[in-house]
Amino acid sequence: MSATEPVRNKHQVRTLIEYYLKLGRFRNHCLVVMSVCTALRISDLLRLRWDDVYDFERGRVRESIVLTEKKTGKTKIVALNKDAVRALARYASKVAVRNGFLIENKRTGKAISRVQAYRIIRAAAKALRLPCRVSCHSLRKTFGYHAWKNGVSPAVIMEIYNHSSLAVTRRYLGVTQDDQNAVYLALNFSA
């Protein structure tokens, strides 16, 4: 299991999401938002094309994306939340090209590499002085951690991640002793 961790602090997640937006770097902003909001593996995210996320006939971002996961070979439907739709719409207004890669290297016309995606995410985390090790994979973990904190069943998160067992998902969520203590302290049975 990777040494990366989810970004547990919601304010830090929001700051990370807004970092490239404030710099006017819409591709990088879209990369971060889609990583956090879809829980896709970076290999699947980088394979997305504009046709997958944008309906050119209607001139709007799709409500969901359908893809075949590279690692599992399973078909997956991912609903796009408001943050993802906004980031995609903002980015589409600048560069949307039918059949072009969503996270494209402008020089080659191909998707950026996994290494470049890592550099983009690490640069933002470093600039924001985030206290945990942040990578592409930790943004996928961030999705699950915050879903769990918002009351989503670990079994549902396991399905979203396409994990083979609940034990894998539990390790993935990075549940800390502080998280466990909060549960103990929240349960009171006296009147």
Image (cartoon, helix red, strand yellow):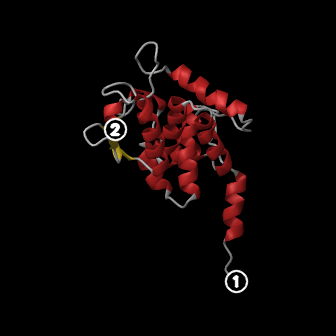
**Residue at 44 percent of width and 39 percent of height:** 88
Residue 85 visible here: yes
Query: Is disc 2 placed on a helix, strand or loop?
Result: strand
**Residue at 44 percent of width and 31 percent of height:** 94
Which quarter of the rendering shows the N terminus?
A: top right
Could you say which quadrant of the image residue 6 lies in? top right
At which x and y percent is residue 78? 38, 45
Q: Nearer the viewer, residue 143 or 92?
A: 92
At which x and y percent is residue 17? 59, 41
Q: Residues within 10 Å of mark 1 (few under 14, many from 20)?
A: few
Q: Nearer the viewer, residue 183 or 125?
A: 125
Numbered circle sitting on residue 54:
2
Which quarter of the rendering shows the C terminus?
A: bottom right
Task: Return the residue at label 1.
Answer: 190
Residue 82 left/right relative to 145: left
At which x and y percent is residue 46? 43, 27
Residue 184 left/right relative to 27: right
Find the distance from the CA under tag 1 to the CA under tag 2: 53 Å
Q: Amino acid at mark 2?
A: Tyr
Instruction: Identify the mark nearer the N-term, 1 or 2.
Output: 2
Query: Which residue sits furthest front?
Result: 93
Q: Amino acid at mark 1?
A: Ser
Numbered circle sitting on residue 95:
none
Can you say whether 94 is above or below 181 in the image? above
**Residue at 35 percent of width and 48 percent of height:** 63
Could you say which quadrant of the image residue 55 lies in? top left
**Residue at 46 percent of width and 13 percent of height:** 107
